[in-house]
Amino acid sequence: MATTNPHRRDWASAAVRKLREDLALALRAAAHHGLSEGVCNHFSVELPDGSGRFLLNPRGLLWQEIQADDIVLVDTVGERLAGRHPVEPTAMHIHAAVHRIGRKAVVLHTHMPFATALTATVDRGLDTALSQNAMRFHGRIAVDDAYNGVALDSSEGERIAHAMNGADIAFLGNHGVVVCGARIDHAYDDLYYVERACMVQVLAASTGRPLAPVPQVMAERVAQQVQGERLQSELFFEALRRTL
């Protein structure tokens, strides 16, 4: 008698089904908000069982079309364990390392335009004292300015993970951003507001007028206020669920 594939059984469980639904929603929301780029970039979430397996969007699908049944389950070396679509090999090199080394449950990697524009400047990233949206990320950002080309091997992902040094958000020089979190709804909310904060910074800089950041102590206070209450993040994600 044929044995049941345990990975397929886990993939189809109610708990993992909910994670697949949330991951697919985050991908569709990112497309809706203009944060996607072709069929590139990936979102992933680790299974909460400590196995190191994680869910990932598949190769070749636009984010706006992805549903829960399109999400694939992979192991730490990129082998597809469950799901009907193939996996892009380069997807593994950043995500597997950040999950494993950075110990992050959710890893969102994009080339979203305003954040990526800032990675191409000499400062490489966001000024977290410049706008209220930026202040929520004060003390949570790392900058990796050692661009080494397309991440085509595990060593590049490991280098990025170590450069993050535990930070929730990394600006990758001349490349894009990585936003991490313990929950999909919180991580997506951060991704959205990182891009909004970067947009404000780019627009403010484009005026040619001197920028006016607040004192560091104020940025620290706002960051603590936002991190102390994440209900707004959860409500935002549920609103996206209703509308997308």
Image: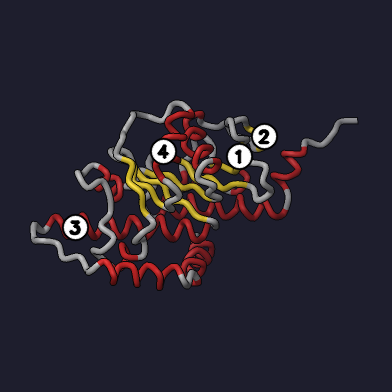
Residue bearing the label numbered 4: 160
- Compared to 40, does 130 lie above or below? below
State the image coordinates of residue 100 (x, y, percent, origin top left). 55, 41
Query: x, y percentage for residue 24?
Result: 54, 50
- Extreme right residue here? 1
Nearest-to-viewer mark from 4 and 1: 4
Q: Marks 4 and 1, how far apart in space?
A: 24 Å
Looking at the picture, which amino acid does disc 3 mark?
A: Leu
The three-letter code of the residue at mark 4 reads Ile
Query: Counting residues from the N terminus, which is met first, the one under dot 2 or under dot 4?
Result: 2
Quarter in which the N terminus is drawn:
top right
- Which of the marked residues, 4 or 1, is nearer the chain's N terminus? 1
In the image: residue 192, left or right of residue 54: left
- The residue type indicated by label 1 comes to Val
- Say whether disc 3 or disc 2 marks the residue closer to the N-terminus: 2
**Residue under the point 52% across and 41% down:** 101
Pointer 3: what residue?
Answer: 203
